[in-house]
Amino acid sequence: MEEDKVRGKAEASGWPARAWRLLSAIRSESPLIQCITNMVSMDLMANTLLSAGASPAMIHSADEIPDFTPHARALCVNVGTLSADWLPAMKLAAQFASQSAKPWVLDPVAAGASGFRLKACLELVELKPTVIRGNASEVIALSKASLGPTKGVDSSHESTDAVEAAKSLAQASGAIVAVSGAVDIVTDGERVVGAHNGVPMMQRITATGCSVTALIAAFVAVDPLHALEATVSALSIFGVAGEMGMNLAKGPASLRMHLIDSLYGLDDAVVHSRVTITSFS
Ligand SMILES: Nc1ncnc2c1ncn2[C@@H]1O[C@H](COP(=O)(O)OP(=O)(O)OP(=O)(O)O)[C@@H](O)[C@H]1O
Ligand SMILES: Cc1ncsc1CCO
Ligand SMILES: [Mg+2]
């Protein structure tokens, strides 16, 4: 009953209609999304983008960036399996994206796990990402610019523990900051919005976070002037795909498959009845 009330309010706010409109735009425009990502996530990330209707390209060589990056509608940079030889390409691509006024999204995987990684993430933040999406531990580490008690790539905090950290990171960087978790939190430093869709089993599949970051890049590509709204919509749509997928799944491996199928098959009615987004402030 309480859940129905929250859904009712979300519907009245116009969020489901916006999420559906942006997903439809991705399906019709098929925006080219360049991804420089970790070796674990490449497959799921590319398939997530394809099933949403976008066109992924996992192109990471610095030699190709000057020719290629200006053609992409958005860039996703993910430091999951970072090494010193990949970092210059990430920075170069971010510079090209910024120079050509293309949105770019940073995933600061395990930002608090080592000094090398934290410094690299802070340097990337200096290059003005449009959106930063991490789990709560990553956003807290980045916001405080300090190493944290870390489980590596997994979070040891709830997303709601990271609201203040997310707001101050957004204010300091000028980026929209998204914290994934049971409730996904999105802020521009003033407004705070919560996206409530998703299922806990999504945490048992590696790279679902990486993949939703790339999906955010696709949503921002089709609505670059409303990055907060596009980010919330992407998180919500991915969560709804997880919920639909979970109805058919037996565990993480089959959820991975059904999530992709569900994202591909989402329709207006499902999006309108399930998308649950609320304002926190
Ligand atoms: N308890 C939960 N309930 C519902 N959805 C969840 C829950 N935890 C995570 N999710 C969803 O799972 C996806 C991945 O979020 P998560 O916070 O696990 O990212 P992550 O730690 O960066 O993952 P990875 O590093 O493996 O890519 C998001 O879409 C998020 O909304
Ligand atoms: C498991 C793992 N290790 C480095 S990146 C990655 C994918 C999830 O972030
Ligand atoms: Mg992650």
Image (spheres, rainbow, N blue to C red):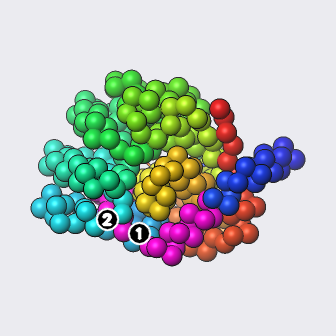
Residue 189 painted magenta = no
Give the total of numbered labels. 2
Percent of width and height locating residue 99: 25, 51
Viewed as shown, does residue 60 lie left or right of 112? left
Which quarter shows the C terminus?
Answer: top right
Estimate the spatial distance between the alpha carbons at disc 1 and disc 2, rounded to whole Å: 8 Å
Percent of width and height locating residue 20: 63, 64
Label 2 SS? loop
The residue segment tinted magenta is: 19-43
> Residue at the spot x=45%, y=67% of the render?
49
**In the rendered image of this protein, does residue 163 appear above or below residue 133?**
above
> Residue at the spot x=25%, y=32% of the render?
119
Residue nearer the viewer, 156 or 28: 28
Viewed as shown, does residue 229 lie left or right of 57? right
Label 1 SS? loop
The residue sitting at the right extreme is: 1
Residue 21 painted magenta = yes
Which kind of residue does numbered mark 1 sit on?
Answer: Pro
> Residue at the spot x=44%, y=73% of the render?
30
Which kind of residue does numbered mark 2 sit on?
Answer: Ala
What's the mark number on residue 72? 2
Q: Residues within 10 Å of mark 1 (few under 14, many from 20)?
A: many
Circle 1 residue: 31
Tell me which numbered mark, 1 or 2, is placed earlier along the sequence. 1
Q: Residues within 10 Å of mark 2 (few under 14, many from 20)?
A: many
Question: Do residues under tags 1 and 2 come within 8 Å of each other at their CB atoms?
Answer: no
